[in-house]
Image (spheres, grey):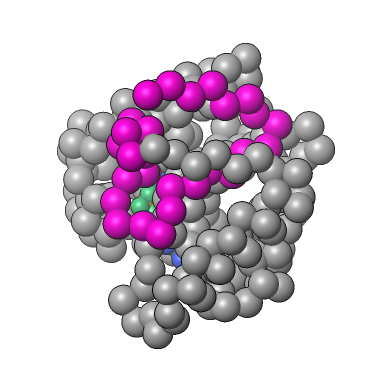
Amino acid sequence: MLTDPAEIKIIQGAKQKNVRDPQRSRAHFESILSDFFQGVRLNGHYLDLGPGQYDFGELARLHGGTSMGVDFDPAVLELGRYKGFETLELNLKALPQAHFDQTFDGVWNKFALNAYWTGYNEDAQKEMANAINNLVVKEGWAWIAPWNGVPKSSDLNEGQLSEILEMQKTAFEDLGFQSTLLTVDQAKKYGVNGTVGNNIIFTKNLKPALSG
Ligand SMILES: C[S@@+](CC[C@H](N)C(=O)[O-])C[C@H]1O[C@@H](n2cnc3c(N)ncnc32)[C@H](O)[C@@H]1O
């Protein structure tokens, strides 16, 4: 939730309607931390892919951590700079080709990665999962909750759409990530509900303890 008038003004220019809403609750983020991050100290340096209103970064700050936001939306980037976060302009579709001169103690992605971006392409799924994995230090964590909504322009059939989700899952699992399929109630609790092909979360070096 944003209360600073200057922040509210900046985020009014965001591309996505839900990101523009200053009343957006941070409760989902607190539920995620309590159900996925038990025993994890958030005092490191983290990467937030698609930071929206920087709720993860703000919570990490409370624990002494720092966070860098990566986004393609100028308003989201401006909000990050105003709030004092490091930011990087990048279309996440090009993450596998991007060069980062640092690695991170954790990578967070809440609803800003889409299995269908790469079409029916197993190698591209692996490249995306690899790129994310390579950004995390060996003992670091990853919390990846894709927004697997089917693009309006898609001409893939039902079978192919399901196979793409399976390719994404296999790509992360082959790198040692754990997959957790959420129930509808859990997806609502974590703020990742909506019209999506699946509600899956990929985690690394975390011990999910979900309820509901
Ligand atoms: C649904 S919002 C989620 C925001 C935040 N993670 C949250 O949960 O509140 C998606 C975020 O990802 C960004 N985003 C979406 N597609 C992107 C892309 N292709 N490249 C970079 N950023 C993208 C949006 O600008 C927005 O900040």
Place of residue 196 in the rendered image (x, y in percent of width and height, measured from the top left): 36, 57
Indicate the position of residue 50 as horizontal and vertical percent values.
Answer: 45, 52
Which residue shows up at 48% across the image and 73% down it? 159
How many callouts does the rendering have? Answer: 0
Horizontally, residue 5 falls left or right of residue 39, namely left
192 vs 43: above or below: below
The N terminus, quarter of image? top left
**Any magenta on residue 99?**
no
In percent of width and height, residue 25 lies at 26, 32
Left or right: where 47 falls relative to 189: right
**Looking at the image, is 175 positioned above or below residue 151?**
above
Read off the magenta span: 184-212
What residue is rendered at 69% in x and 58% in y? 171
From this viewpoint, which residue is outermost toward the bottom? Answer: 155
On the question of residue 137 being in view, the answer is yes
Quadrant of the rendered structure where residue 83 is?
A: top left
Ligand 1 positioned in quadrant = bottom left
Image quarter (top left, top right, bottom left or bottom right) of the C terminus: top left
Q: Which residue is drawn at 43% across and 48% down?
A: 199
